[in-house]
Image: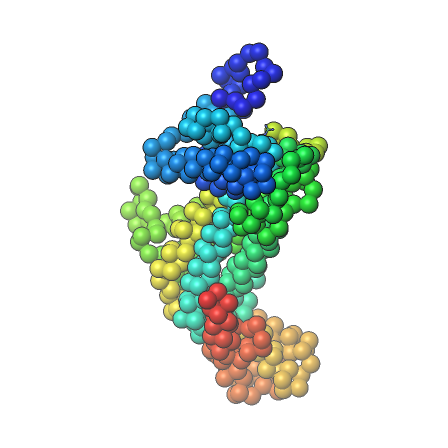
């Protein structure tokens, strides 16, 4: 069914109609479409563009349609061109000629932009809540494992001792930035396009502030061409979602590594693991792998939106109908990933002994040996070289810095005393890293509390 039949002599072919139709994916905006139409009809009534009684009749009809879709009494007509066409057609079917007045001073161009923004605003808020929930789980775990020593890595080589709580809080920081990006995105999205009409505004004496207030927008768009042709809010939201997926994907990668027998720093709960159809011993971190894999979809959606928008002349072009599947897919994917990821993290079993064991190999306290020398008057570069020689000697003797005898230390540099052994115990190394932002247990406790306070 089309709204624009007047100038056409022939029916649209079935294949063209199917190709052109968006109802299979834009029907999810039915609530927003109806809310938008109720506000629009109310405004038309208040401004005297249609009679108040007509407006009331329309609003009543629309409420009935909403109730019937919600209850399942009314199904979408998949032959309809889009959700806007379907609801307007259904309204006229139900209330007769007054239904035909609804579209006065409106176009599907400002209507679709409105619906999309109303829908996506809710999604931003929902995802923000999910990210907050994940941050809460991270902060609780960080507090619990504030003094659990583990190796910190660079180049995936053991580098310096840190605490597991500190490692986890790095992700809380990323996700807090994501929250602030979502907030920014919402602020910019919060501009109502309705009243831009097809592209050139209207000659009717509309009052856009009435619809703005009824629909809960912060402000109205300033330019009718931009109002109907702007999809920055989709691109920006998809970009923020992509960054969220980068963070979830990196976290997933670490979880996958930590679950391997080579690390065994953690074990995932059975409820969040899967087995193999052939290898009976397997317990696979499929959920984390899927989250890592699904990041590709969201990046792809962002690229779709950028590409759809980059070459279209102002104002509306049908290309823009392609915005919805991309942004909806990005939204659905991120929601699904967060729904699975947060409880997976919450229920993981942490194995501190294995983290401690891994931290004890690989000379991760070598910097602390050099620092000890420096604090005892040796210039850092000389201390660095001396420690390098000590590491080489340890490798020769098959031992580590903690067990290397003092006379070996003294052979390399006579400043060394017994004291060095205390300074290089891993717990001590970590406890001394109290400079703001560092992994010392007291810092981690304080940061976990800070993070919790932010999201509470
Ligand atoms: N289904 C269309 C979309 O999603 C609605 C706007 C149609 N406007 C038009 N001038 N054909 O973009």
Please tell me whether residue 434 is drawn above or below residue 111 in the rendered image: below
Looking at this rendering, what residue extends furthest in the top direction?
Answer: 9
Instruction: Tell me what residue is drawn at x 35 percent, y 52 percent.
Output: 272
Instruction: Tell me what residue is drawn at x 64 percent, y 35 percent.
Output: 204
- Where does residue 377 sit, x and y in percent of width and height? 66, 86
Instruction: Tell me what residue is drawn at x 49 percent, y 26 percent.
Output: 97
- Where does residue 11 sit, x and y in percent of width and height? 53, 14
Please tell me whether residue 344 is drawn above or below residue 330 in the rendered image: below
Towards the viewer: 448 or 160? 448
Looking at this rendering, what residue extends furthest in the left direction?
Answer: 280
Please tell me whether residue 68 is drawn above or below residue 428 in the rendered image: above
Residue 382 picture quarter: bottom right
Towards the viewer: 245 or 101? 101
Towards the viewer: 370 or 318? 318
Residue 40 picture quarter: top right
Tell me if residue 362 can be seen: no
- Where does residue 54 sit, x and y in percent of width and height? 49, 34
Towards the viewer: 434 or 300? 300
Tell me if residue 434 can be seen: yes
**Quadrant of picture, ligand 1:** top right
> Number of marks in the image?
0
Instruction: Tell me what residue is drawn at x 38 percent, y 64 percent.
Output: 350
């Amino acid at each position: 069914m089309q709204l624009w039949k007047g100038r056409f002599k022939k029916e649209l072919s079935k294949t063209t109609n199917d190709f052109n139709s968006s109802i299979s994916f834009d029907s999810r905006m039915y609530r927003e479409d109806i809310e938008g139409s109720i506000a629009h009809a109310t405004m038309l009534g208040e401004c005297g563009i249609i009679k108040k009684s007509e407006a009331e009749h329309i609003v009543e009809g629309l409420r009935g349609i909403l109730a019937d879709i919600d209850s399942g009494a009314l199904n979408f007509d998949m032959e309809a061109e889009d959700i806007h066409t379907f609801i307007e057609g259904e309204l006229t079917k139900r209330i007769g000629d007054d239904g035909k007045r609804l579209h006065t001073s409106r176009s599907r161009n400002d209507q679709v932009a409105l619906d999309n923004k109303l829908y996506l605003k809710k999604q931003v808020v929902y995802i923000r809540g999910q990210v907050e929930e994940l941050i809460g789980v991270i902060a609780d775990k960080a507090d619990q494992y504030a003094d659990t020593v583990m190796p910190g890595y660079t180049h995936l080589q053991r580098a310096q001792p840190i605490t597991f709580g500190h490692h986890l809080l790095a992700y809380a920081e990323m996700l807090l930035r994501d929250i602030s990006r979502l907030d920014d995105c919402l602020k910019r999205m919060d501009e109502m396009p309705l009243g831009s009409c097809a592209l050139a505004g209207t000659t009717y004496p509309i009052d856009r502030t009435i619809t703005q207030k009824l629909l809960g927008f912060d402000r109205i768009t300033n330019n009718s061409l931009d109002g109907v042709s702007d999809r920055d809010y989709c691109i920006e939201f998809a970009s923020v979602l992509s960054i969220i997926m980068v963070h979830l994907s990196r976290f997933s990668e670490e979880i996958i590594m930590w679950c391997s027998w080579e690390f065994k720093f953690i074990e995932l709960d059975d409820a969040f693991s899967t087995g193999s159809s052939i290898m009976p011993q397997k317990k696979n971190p499929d959920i984390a792998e899927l989250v890592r894999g699904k990041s590709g979809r969201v990046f792809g959606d962002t690229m779709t939106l950028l590409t759809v928008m980059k070459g279209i002349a102002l104002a509306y072009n049908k290309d823009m109908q392609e915005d919805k599947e991309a942004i909806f897919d990005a939204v659905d994917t991120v929601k699904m990933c967060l729904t699975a990821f947060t409880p997976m993290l919450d229920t993981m079993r942490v194995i501190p002994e294995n983290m401690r064991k891994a931290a004890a190999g690989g000379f991760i306290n070598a910097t602390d040996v050099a620092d000890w020398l420096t604090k005892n008057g040796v210039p850092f570069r000389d201390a660095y070289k001396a420690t390098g020689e000590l590491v080489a000697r340890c490798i020769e003797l098959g031992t580590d810095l903690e067990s290397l005898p003092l006379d070996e230390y003294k052979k390399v540099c006579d400043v060394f005393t017994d004291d060095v052994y205390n300074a290089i115990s891993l717990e001590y190394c970590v406890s001394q890293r109290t400079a703001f932002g560092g992994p010392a247990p007291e810092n981690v406790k304080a940061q976990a509390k800070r993070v919790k306070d932010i999201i509470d």
